[in-house]
Amino acid sequence: MKNVESVIRENGGWERLARENISVENGRGQVLEILTPREGGEPDAVLVSQYEAGSGGIIRAPEIFFEVTPGGLWIPVCLRDDFTGEMLNVFRLHKHLTVICCETSRELFRRAAEWDRKIREMGFVDPDPDSEYYPLFANA
């Protein structure tokens, strides 16, 4: 989640996120909101939502809840997309036990990485000439 981390860094860092939500507009009617349910210290869970205006009001497209390890690994746990009506959750209840669905986990990792790349393209982060996402700018 390199680009989400860039948004956090550019907008007050983890210290600010521990106190309040970070909300960034891209000038195209879209808002990226980042929040954590934990107060104080470095968050161990982060909710990242992209909102945009739809015909019926504001829609999430998408929203992903992550667990963040002390080593900085972002693990996507749940995805919700109002536009498609999709809801993916890594955890399932089966006979009163919590089960991890590995196939859903792989899909969430893939979707989260794809969305993270698009966050820069959508204008939530300034283009970085040295970025791996902008090879045309390299050596310019």
Image (tube, helix red, strand yellow):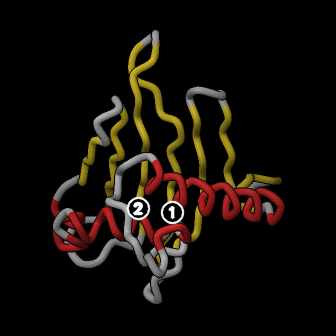
Which residue is depicted at the point 54% across and 60% down?
117
Name the side, left or right, on which 54 lies relative to 7.
right
**Image quadrant where residue 81 sits:** top right
Q: Is residue 10 above or below residue 26?
A: below
Q: Secondary structure at mark 1?
A: strand
Which residue is depicted at the point 45% across and 17% down?
54
Q: Residue furthest front?
A: 140
Q: Residue furthest top?
A: 55
Mark 2 touches mark 1? (CB < 8 Å): yes
For residue 44, say whether it is visible.
yes
Label placed on residue 66: 1
**According to the image, label 2 marks what residue?**
46
Q: Is residue 80 above or below residue 113?
A: above
Q: Earlier in the sequence, mark 2 or mark 1?
A: 2
Q: Is residue 106 above or below residue 58?
A: below
Q: Position of residue 133 (x, y in %)?
A: 54, 67
Q: Position of residue 13 (x, y in %)?
A: 22, 71
Q: Residues within 10 Å of mark 2 (few under 14, many from 20)?
A: many
For residue 97, say whether it is visible.
no
**Image quadrant where residue 130 sits:** bottom left
Q: CA distance from mark 2 to mark 1?
A: 5 Å
Name the side, left or right, on which 5 lies relative to 24.
right
Q: Quadrant of the C terminus?
A: bottom left
**Amino acid tagged 1:** Phe
Label placed on residue 104: none
Which residue is depicted at the point 82% across and 53% down?
95
**Amino acid tagged 2:** Val
Q: Position of residue 40 (x, y in %)?
A: 20, 72
